[in-house]
Image (cartoon, coloured by chain):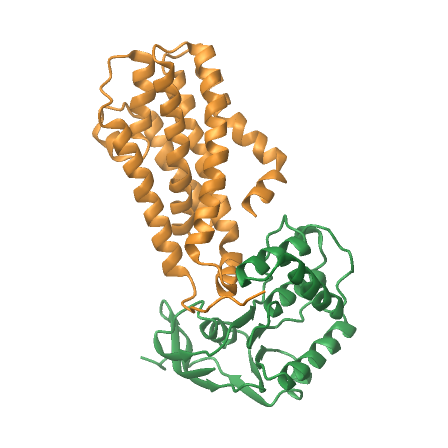
Chain colours: A orange, B green
């Protein structure tokens, strides 16, 4: 259902792709950090899409769970679809940055941008599960990603935020002398922890009735 | 279905205060009361969508829940909703479309309507909302003002269906504001707004 809903919103799809490109394009000729800015801005797109997917589906999800779905089935279905979309956009965006900026380590850049997309989806689903309404969800998104964008990756607060790992990877791909030993494990750990949070909240909110499915 | 002295509070506000209700198979019960009396909250507790602060809820059999506000995916059509719910119910897509199509037709949903939910009229959305609750043979029907936006024919048809569901052995609970409906059920539970000091 998330796939159909996304496919039927061509304007939203276009904006989701254009937003990180706009961040990158606006900074490309003025800043050495254009790739970092653009790469992290992907989080606005993918986490935003995930927040709306989770929040708009919330009332229907309850009925679907009553009908027989397990909350984790709904969450995983949404996660896989959004991850697929996010990683596709990340692949396109990585090519744009490699061609536009010419990073020293293009594969590290691709991994960093991909990790932004990978982490954004569970981040958005967790915020979507936590936030009472769209406005609160979007404000949390702007707050977290906006703060991450303004901070250097060496700052303590940056290290506590979900996109620190990919920020380090993208920075390393451009500057080359940035330690990235912890970046990938921390990034994945954050993504899985956020997914766990989303799953926990979805399950806690779900109707408690257990029943076998009927046969055809 | 049994509710034993259930209470629910949202913040400081007591919404449902020690309500008990028992609905047997083949019985239809109407829940009435003024705005804010806790009718929807009570029904949501029956469906286990919210947990009572006190008291217990026991439901035997699959619940078909029709919320007051149609819970629909705005960009999906009626058939796509039926297919989606069918998957949850473990029904084949063909059977869901057949059974759901029949239910929709009985309530006067435009046959062959392929529009997305956001383009449907209020009455048509409500008919789809109701059909999704009925799909797959639920044994307990919890219907929260399910006929909002229905034309007269569909409204009459709805109450004819209630009589049929009773004969088929279903337990039916209908939240209603309309007195005409209360004459067509076995019992009426009238809720009052809990007094400020109650439940303390």
What percent of the width, then of the height, locates residue A143? 37, 36
Evaluate whether residue A134 shows in this view. Answer: no
Residues B152 and A3: in front is: A3
- In the rendered view, would you say B197 is above or below B130? below
What percent of the width, then of the height, locates residue A200? 34, 54
Evaluate whether residue B141 shows in this view. Answer: yes
Residue drawn at the location 44% of the way across and 33% of the way down: A44
Residues B57 and A136: in front is: B57
Farthest residue in the front direction?
Answer: A216
Question: Is B152 situated left or right of B94 in this image?
Answer: right
Question: Is A124 situated left or right of B106 in this image?
Answer: left
Residue drawn at the location 65% of the way across and 80% of the way down: B178
- In the rendered view, would you say B170 is above or below A208? below
What percent of the width, then of the height, locates residue A100? 46, 11
Q: How many badges with numbers are in the image?
A: 0
Residue drawn at the location 61% of the way across and 64% of the way down: B132
Residue drawn at the location 37% of the way across and 20% of the way down: A36
Residues A211 and A10: in front is: A211
The C terminus of chain B sits in image quarter: bottom left
Image quadrant assignment for residue A28: top left
Image quadrant assignment for residue A3: top right
Image quadrant assignment for residue B19: bottom left
What percent of the width, then of the height, locates residue B26? 59, 86
């Amino acid at each position: 259902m998330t796939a159909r809903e996304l496919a039927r919103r061509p304007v939203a799809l276009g904006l989701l792709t254009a937003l990180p490109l706009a961040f990158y394009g606006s900074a490309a000729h003025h800043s050495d950090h254009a790739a970092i800015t653009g790469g992290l801005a992907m989080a606005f797109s993918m986490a935003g899409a995930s927040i709306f997917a989770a929040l708009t589906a919330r009332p229907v999800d309850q009925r679907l769970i009553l009908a027989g779905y397990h909350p984790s089935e709904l969450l995983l279905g949404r996660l896989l679809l959004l991850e697929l979309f996010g990683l596709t956009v990340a692949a396109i965006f990585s090519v744009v940055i490699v061609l536009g900026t010419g990073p020293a380590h293009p594969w590290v850049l691709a991994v960093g941008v991909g990790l932004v997309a990978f982490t954004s989806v569970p981040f958005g689903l967790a915020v979507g599960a936590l936030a009472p309404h769209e406005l609160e969800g979007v404000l949390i998104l702007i707050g977290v990603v906006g703060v991450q964008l303004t901070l250097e990756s060496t700052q303590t607060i940056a290290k506590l935020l979900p996109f620190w790992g990919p920020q380090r990877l993208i920075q390393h791909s451009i500057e080359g002398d940035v330690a990235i030993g912890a970046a990938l494990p921390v990034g994945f750990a954050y993504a899985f922890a956020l997914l766990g949070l989303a799953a926990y909240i979805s399950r806690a909110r779900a109707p408690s009735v257990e029943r076998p499915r009927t046969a055809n | 279905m049994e509710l034993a002295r259930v209470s629910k509070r949202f913040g400081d506000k007591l919404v449902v205060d020690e309500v008990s209700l028992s609905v047997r198979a083949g019985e239809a019960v109407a829940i009435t009361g003024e705005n804010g009396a806790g009718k929807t909250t009570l029904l949501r507790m029956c469906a286990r969508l919210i947990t009572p602060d006190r008291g217990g809820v026991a439901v035997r059999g699959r619940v078909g829940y029709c919320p007051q506000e149609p819970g629909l995916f705005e960009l999906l059509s009626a058939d796509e909703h039926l297919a989606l719910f069918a998957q949850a119910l473990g029904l084949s897509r063909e059977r869901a479309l057949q059974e759901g199509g029949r239910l929709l037709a009985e309530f006067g949903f435009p046959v062959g309507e392929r529009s997305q939910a956001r383009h449907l009229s209020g009455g048509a959305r409500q008919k789809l909302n109701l059909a999704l609750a009925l799909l797959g043979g639920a044994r307990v029907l919890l219907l929260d003002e399910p006929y909002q936006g229905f034309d007269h024919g569909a409204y009459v048809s709805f109450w004819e269906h209630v009589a049929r569901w009773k004969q088929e052995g279903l337990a039916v609970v209908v939240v209603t504001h309309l007195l005409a409906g209360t004459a067509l059920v076995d019992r009426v539970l009238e809720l009052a707004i809990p007094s400020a000091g109650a439940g303390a």
